[in-house]
Amino acid sequence: MNASTVSIASHDGRAFDAYLSLPPKGTGPGLIIIQEIWGVNAHIRAVADQYALDGYVVLAPDVFWRQQPRVDLQYTEADTQLAYQYMTHLDGPNAVRDLVSTAQALRARPEVNGKIGSVGFCMGGRLSYALAGSGAVDAAVCYYGGGIQNNLGLAASVQVPILFHYAELDDHIPQEAVSAVRDAFAAHQQARFHVYPGVGHGFNCWGRPLYNQRAAALARGRTLQWLAENLG
């Protein structure tokens, strides 16, 4: 892969890192991959590379940099406890501002020749939703975004196409929460929902026990179709 670490200027005069992965042809639409709580780890970098191979110019920003730069954790019990600490202490408004800065930096890259979107997982799914509400991206995808149901006042601000993936047996996001999000987007003509039966939270991550190959493949195919339709 043609990948590297780049620096992005923050809104408050500082800078943070992002993993950049370029497509084989060198140019394409832009895509922001937003991490889970384990940081921009090997899994997230691999996901970024997957989408780069599909023709996207991909940036995966370091969401936790204001607490600790370059968080890169594994799925052990000790690292997971640390990951939850980072998530608990995340400055949400600044995290969204940093993602807006990431979107601006991505649009400005010479390799980007089209629109830009975001794909987020778990905590990143919630942040992808918030980024869509900011208007900084042209389309958004949210994989099992925990907490979206607690911030539905933002739904009216989401004017771009948005795709939601949920797990039927998610022990973090009950189906009542999924229904609440669906209801909030009932009038949004470019909002789509998919609920995957028989699987739990985190089904896309092959490094975790709840990984489900079929659901992950199906969700990825739907995501690629969605991005192709809405980013060009």
Image (tube, grey):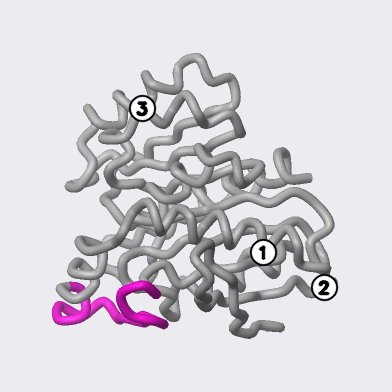
Check disc 3: other Cα within 10 Å, few if <14, some if 14-19, many if 20+.
Answer: few
- In the rendered image, which quarter contains the N terminus? bottom right
The overriding secondary structure of the stretch rendered in magenta is loop
Please identify, in this view, whether the residue under mark 1 or under mark 2 is nearer the observer. 1
Quadrant of res 20: bottom right
| Residue that mark 3 sits on | 153
Element under label 1? helix
Answer whether labels 3 and 1 touch (C-beta < 8 Å): no
Task: Say which label, 1 or 2, has the lower sequence index.
Answer: 2
Q: What amino acid does circle 1 point to? A: Ala
Looking at the image, tell me whether mark 3 or mark 1 is earlier in sequence order.
1
Q: Which residue is mark 1?
A: 105
Q: Is residue 223 left or right of residue 216?
A: right
On screen, residue 211 versus residue 42, left or right, reads left
| In the displayed structure image, the side of residue 198 where residue 30 appears, left or right | right
For label 3, the SS is helix
Q: Which residue is mark 2?
A: 26
- For image coordinates 45% across by 16% down, the residue present is 186
Disc 1 packing (10 Å; few <14; some 14–19; many ≥20): some
Disc number for residue 25: none
Q: Which residues are magenta?
A: 65-80
Q: Nearer the viewer, residue 205 or 155?
A: 155
